[in-house]
Image (cartoon, grey):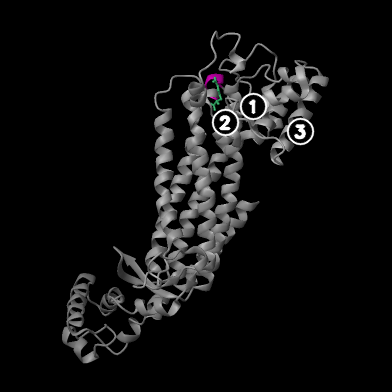
Amino acid sequence: MDLYKSRFSERTSDIAHKFNSSIKTDYRLYPYDIKGSIAHAKMLCECSIISSEDCDLIVSGLESILEDLNNGKLEISYESEDIHMFIESELTKRIGNSGKKLHTARSRNDQVALDLKLYTKDKTEEAVLYIKNLISTILKISQDNLNTVMPGYTHLQIAQPVTFAHHIMAYAQMFMRDLQRIQDLSNRLDISPLGACALATTTYNIDRFSTAEKLGFSKVTLNSIDSVSDRDFVVDFIYCLAMFSMHLSRLAEELIIFSSQEFNYIKISDKYSSGSSIMPQKKNPDMAELLRAKSAKMYSNLMGILTMLKAIPLAYNKDMQEDKIYLFESVEIFEISVEIITNILETMQVDKFRMREMASKGYINATDAADYLVKKGLTFRDSYYIIGEIVKYAISEDLSLNDISLEKYQEFSNKFDEDYFHFIDLDYILNQRDVFSGPSPKRVQEQINIVKEKLDDSKK
Ligand code: ARG
């Protein structure tokens, strides 16, 4: 490393350089690094630390580097230790001596903390848009399936009737929480660390508030040592993404189950499926399986960053260079996953008849049958017992609760009457579940409207 040659008697060995270098990962920070450097240079000029001629040269030099990196004219050289050094040396190549003034009153420690914060801010804003789009897709599916009766499950055993709209709206709630969690980060991301320098600020008369304002931060960090040691915001975001991926893995699992021949509730589009190399008939839900699997990587990144940060003494230590590996990977997995799931949902077909058919099985209306007897004056436990006996009888005769004659019912209890059959009808049951948050089409419509409103509100 040429930069260190005055202090060092020997060059860093090639293998040490390779081990130490982060440029293959942190090149992704270049737009943020350049933005931060421009703000820093302008502030140095405002504070009369560099001349306006130097400042103009630095700013236009950095702008030309940004342009050339964006359009591929300039290739990033892996000779540099990291992206910060690459940009600085490229600047000096382009503008000469003035480029050597950029790093006045700054350290890579506050520079990298800033770059990472700007990157995270950007990515949280993008994540919010992605998740909103996913929720909007779920809202559309729900709107189309308000009356699509399906079995609701507990223990993956048929429990009580719900609708597909009601079922999938549960995921809208999970993703709404993900959205809020990510939006909550914006406050903690809104604090500029720039000006902390290596750890103890500087003797130059810099203006930290000016760079903060130029970079869109409303506050600056209060303690310079913390400013360069803090990676909480990275952990926060990785955690949010891990939580999202956990939700996604549950949804993916259901898509896999629901598209199996045994369930046959949905068909995943060919566009988001794969075949088999030997079995010509096969169509496999590979994308959903991969979404399910990716959660492992997202959790391991969370564990990784927490473990890497554990017990690091103050202030900056090189361990922290590794933070980007976890962060970038989680962001990249998130971005492709959220697009894939949105596309799968948008293109899948829902088999409403099959769902209703399965909702007529499994004695799904047994709770309602018990509630009928309660309405006729029995206690819930007594009626629960009687219906249990009837279900046992129905299973032995291979009958559904709707197939048994009234006379037979009356052998179990004299409370049964003609109106009973209406009471255990699927659509009737569903409409009767008219409790806020419940499956009746009216209540699900209410849910959809509330979520829609919240989504619109958060746009403001
Ligand atoms: N590449 C380094 C990182 O990402 C930049 C900061 C280096 N600071 C230092 N004191 N060596 O963490």
**Position in image of residue 380 (x %, y %):** 24, 71
Residues shaded magenta = 223-227
Q: CA distance from mark 3 to mark 2?
A: 20 Å
Question: Helix, strand, or loop for circle 3?
Answer: helix
In this rendered view, identify the residue nearer to me: 243 or 438.
Answer: 243
Residue 439 vertical position relative to residue 425 in the rendered view, above or below: above
Nearer-N-terminus badge (3/2): 2
The residue indicated by pointer 3 is 64
Q: Is 279 inside the magenta-drawn segment?
A: no
Nearer-N-terminus badge (2/1): 2
Q: Amino acid at mark 3?
A: Ser
The residue indicated by pointer 1 is 86
Q: Residues within 10 Å of mark 2 (few under 14, many from 20)?
A: many
Residue 30 in view here: yes
Q: Give the left or right position of residue 102, taking residue 82 as reference.
A: right
Q: Amino acid at mark 2?
A: Ile
Instruction: Please report the residue visible at 18 percent of the width from the left and 85 percent of the height from the top.
Output: 397
* Mark 2 and mark 1 residues within 8 Å of each other at the beta carbon: yes
Find residue 23 and name its label.
2
Instruction: Please report the residue visible at 50 percent of the width from the left and 19 percent of the height from the top.
Output: 315
Secondary structure predominantly adopted by residues drawn in magenta: helix
Nearer-N-terminus badge (1/3): 3
* Mark 1 and mark 3 residues within 8 Å of each other at the beta carbon: no
Instruction: Please report the residue visible at 43 percent of the width from the left and 50 percent of the height from the top.
Output: 294
Q: Give the left or right position of residue 276, taking residue 189 as reference.
A: left
